[in-house]
Image (tube, rainbow, N blue to C red):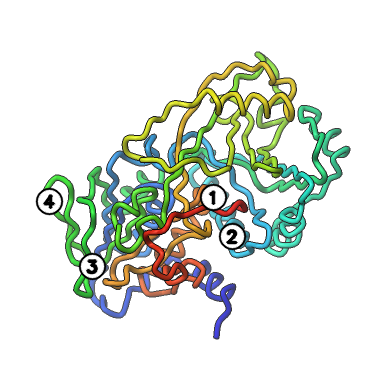
Amino acid sequence: MPSRRDLLKASLSLPMTAVLSRRVLTQAPRIVVVGAGAFGGWTALELARRGARVTLIDAWGPGNVRASSGGETRIIRAGYGTRSIYTRLAARALQLWRAHDERWQRGFFRRIGALWMFGRDDSFGRASASAVPAEGLPIEALTPSAAARRFPQINFSGVSSVLFEPEAGYLLARRACEHVVERVVAEGGEYRQAAVASPVRVGGGRFASLPLADGTALSSDAFVFAGGPWLGALFPDVIGRLVTPTRQEVYYFGTPAGDDRFLDARLPAWVDFGERVIYGAPGNANRGFKVADDTAGPPFDPTSGDRNATASGVKSARAFLKRRFPALADAPLVGAEVCQYEASPDSDFIVDTHPAAANVWIVGGGSGHGFKMGPALGELVASCVLGQAIPDPIFRLARFGSRAKSPAPRKKWS
């Protein structure tokens, strides 16, 4: 019986040439991908590169403000504690981001490193310190005093241990989503801005035609639904509340004029892993110094929810800055946004077929840590759709039993 590691390794090392499913022998399969975010866009690009006839659709466009893959930046790092399957995915994703950046020369990946700061409980860090090097990536352990000498912009009080991932950094999220869709079209696929008629009704063993909100329909051999926070509404019977959108506020603070201490050259991306998990990025595509709380917020409607920052959230972010980045204690708030996590109950991804139709794939549950994985997950999903691989059990719907109507509290590890 192959191990989980073997299955993932096999799915991530398949050749780029197309190997079509047994059913399609003489003609490339037609595949519709719903959702042009990190999961859907990269899946569509990988399918097109393997010879499939791909149609990618999105209701508001790639990297749009409502999408979980929208916003300026996302951190990419490999530390996942004991969740080594994600360390392996992140290691592969880093390889692919670097390769694409070399090919495209667009600078979507900013390799500035990632700094982890741990409070009293550093078990996550100790597990990461073992798992990351096992995937061929460097990680450096620092004492708080050594870290303070290296990064004097940071106040390390209350920090028990520090890790530094030099190959990590951040990604230009919105711009990358837009470019991936451009590459899908350039490499033979089709992109359409269109909305799916919700809910999607699947039955009878095979799904052949997808109704759209404008009254038309798309016929295809297979369908991939990477609808992010809308998956529960698209499939209320199968997904339901297994994917719960939560409201997440992100803040951008202005740094002093001419002060480079809080730009990419002087400061890495960072994660403060204490009672709460706070993270951020310097420079941040000239948007400002990014600060965000990883704690899952309240349930949120991604279509019509209010996306204005709250006074209490800004106050909490300022209190954190005063404690951890004291030079920014009085920095002006120059921008804010509200995005959402698409949380699964265990924070693991969902990659599986619909139980009523083997040609319908459901991909989601990014849970706030999925964007970085886009290129690697695209490889995996394309392999599954084309019959070259099967999803790891950790991603299968069977793990939830019959809990589609239950809420999805998010575990604090991602």
The residue under the point 68% across, 29% down is 320
Q: Where is residue 58 in the image (x, y as percent from the top left)?
A: 29, 45
Q: Earlier in the sequence, mark 1 or mark 4?
A: 4
Q: Do the residues labelled 2 and 1 touch (CB within 8 Å)?
A: yes
Q: Earlier in the sequence, mark 1 or mark 3?
A: 3
Q: Is 18 left, or right, of 356 in this rendering?
A: right
Badge 1: residue crowd in 10 Å (few <14, some 14–19, many ≥20)? many
Task: Mark 1 vs mark 4: give the one in front.
Answer: 1
Task: Mark 1 vs mark 3: give the one in front.
Answer: 1
On the image, numbered disc 2 is attached to which residue?
86
Q: Is 74 left, or right, of 221 in this rendering?
A: right
Q: Is mark 3 on a helix, strand or loop?
A: loop
Please identify the quadrant where the N terminus is shown.
bottom right
Residue kind at label 2, given as amino acid type: Tyr
Q: Is mark 4 on a helix, strand or loop?
A: loop
Distance CA(mark 1)–CA(mark 3)? 30 Å
On the image, numbered disc 3 is attached to which residue?
221
